[in-house]
């Protein structure tokens, strides 16, 4: 943004600007967003509403509430209908202008359009402009983006894309349509679509579980050692032999 401090700019390196255009959000992680699009394709036997793949509720509530929000001057307005005369980015009322070139049409609902305004739009490239699959109304509050921004601890990681709120029986087949946008060839990477079950504690991650067991065992052993030392060779509080004086 135009008021970006030097400290904020340094935190954005190596991706802060493209020429004279400021990236918002900036930084390497935000601008390497996993932008593949995955759509569940139900069969005739999976046509009821319980077979919907939910893509809301996948991010941490604390992230959505405290960490990610649209720019302070951002605003939007839902049109009466997409064909309404006032649903025009050049239409202004009560001194309010819109930065959009065309109204945003919601792909999930018919005849639902929005006008929107982003500050410093001429000198700033926002997330929805970098990744067109993200709605300009959501911007950085898009849950797929919020999930991506929670950095993984290891180079091999999983990110939740969606979930089914129903039981899936063994042997049932699920089909997905994937738009392959996220290139991995340049860094010799790979990507996979994984179906798994979760619990109240999250998904399966054996490596973290083993790490916790090893760390917990080490802490238990150290605690036991100091407990035995205190029982058999207690330190008397304020004993002179533990006091050190400077040599005069």
Image (cartoon, grey):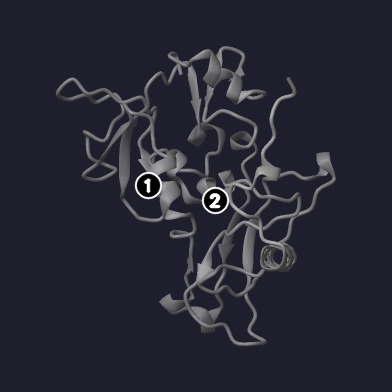
Distance of label 1 from label 2 (alpha carbons): 13 Å
Which residue is found at the position 34% from the left and 54% from the top? Answer: 110
Most extreme residue toward the left, as rendered?
A: 94
Q: Residue 98, percent across and down?
A: 31, 26
Image coords of residue 30 (percent x, y):
59, 36
Q: The C terminus is located in which quarter? A: top right
In the drawing, what numbered circle is on residue 146? none
Give 97 or 202, whichever is nearer the viewer: 202
Q: Residue at x 79, y 53 (%)?
A: 190
Residue 225, percent across and down?
73, 65
Q: Is residue 156 left or right of residue 152?
A: right
Label 2 crowd bin: few (<14), some (14–19), many (20+), radius 10 Å: some
Q: Is residue 5 above or below residue 93?
A: above
Q: Quadrant of residue 205?
A: bottom right
- Would residue 138 be visible to someone looking at this image? no
Is 118 placed left or right of 193 in the picture? left
- Mark in front: 1 vs 2: 1
From the viewer's side, name the closer residue of 92 and 171: 171
Query: Which of marks 2 and 1 precedes in the sequence?
Result: 1
Q: Is residue 204 something that shows in the picture?
A: yes
Q: Residue 223: x, y in percent? A: 68, 64
Residue nearest the viewer, comparing 102 with 178: 178
Tell me where residue 75 sits by quadrant. Answer: top left
33 or 178, nearer to the observer: 33
Circle 1 residue: 65
Q: Secondary structure at mark 1?
A: helix
What residue appears at the point 53 percent right and 63 percent down from the top-left corner?
Answer: 162
Q: Is residue 245 left or right of residue 50?
A: right
On the image, numbered disc 2 is attached to which residue? Answer: 147
Indicate the quadrant where residue 120 lies.
Answer: top left
Q: Residue at x 21, y 44 (%)?
A: 80
223 above or below 8? Answer: below
């Amino acid at each position: 943004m135009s008021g970006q401090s030097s400290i904020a700019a340094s935190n954005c390196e190596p991706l802060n600007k493209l020429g004279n255009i400021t990236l918002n959000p900036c930084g390497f992680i935000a601008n390497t967003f996993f932008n593949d699009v995955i759509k569940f394709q139900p069969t005739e036997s999976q046509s009821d509403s319980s077979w919907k793949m939910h893509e809301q509720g996948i991010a941490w509530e604390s992230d959505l509430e405290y960490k990610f929000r649209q720019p302070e001057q951002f605003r939007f307005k839902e049109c009466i209908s997409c064909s309404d005369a006032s649903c025009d980015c050049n239409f202004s009322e009560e001194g309010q202008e819109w930065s959009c070139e065309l109204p945003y049409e919601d792909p999930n609902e018919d005849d639902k359009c929005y006008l929107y305004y982003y500050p410093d739009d001429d000198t700033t490239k926002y997330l929805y402009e970098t990744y067109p699959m993200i709605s300009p109304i959501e911007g950085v509050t898009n849950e797929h983006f919020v999930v991506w921004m929670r950095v993984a601890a290891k180079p091999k990681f999983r990110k939740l894309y969606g979930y089914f709120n129903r039981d899936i029986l063994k042997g049932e087949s699920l089909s997905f349509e994937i738009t392959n946008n996220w290139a991995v060839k340049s860094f010799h990477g790979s990507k996979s679509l994984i179906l798994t079950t979760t619990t109240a504690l999250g998904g399966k991650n054996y490596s973290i579980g083993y790490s916790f067991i090893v760390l917990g065992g080490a802490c238990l052993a150290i605690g036991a050692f100091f407990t035995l030392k205190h029982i058999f060779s207690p330190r008397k509080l304020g004993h002179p032999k533990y006091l050190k004086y400077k040599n005069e």
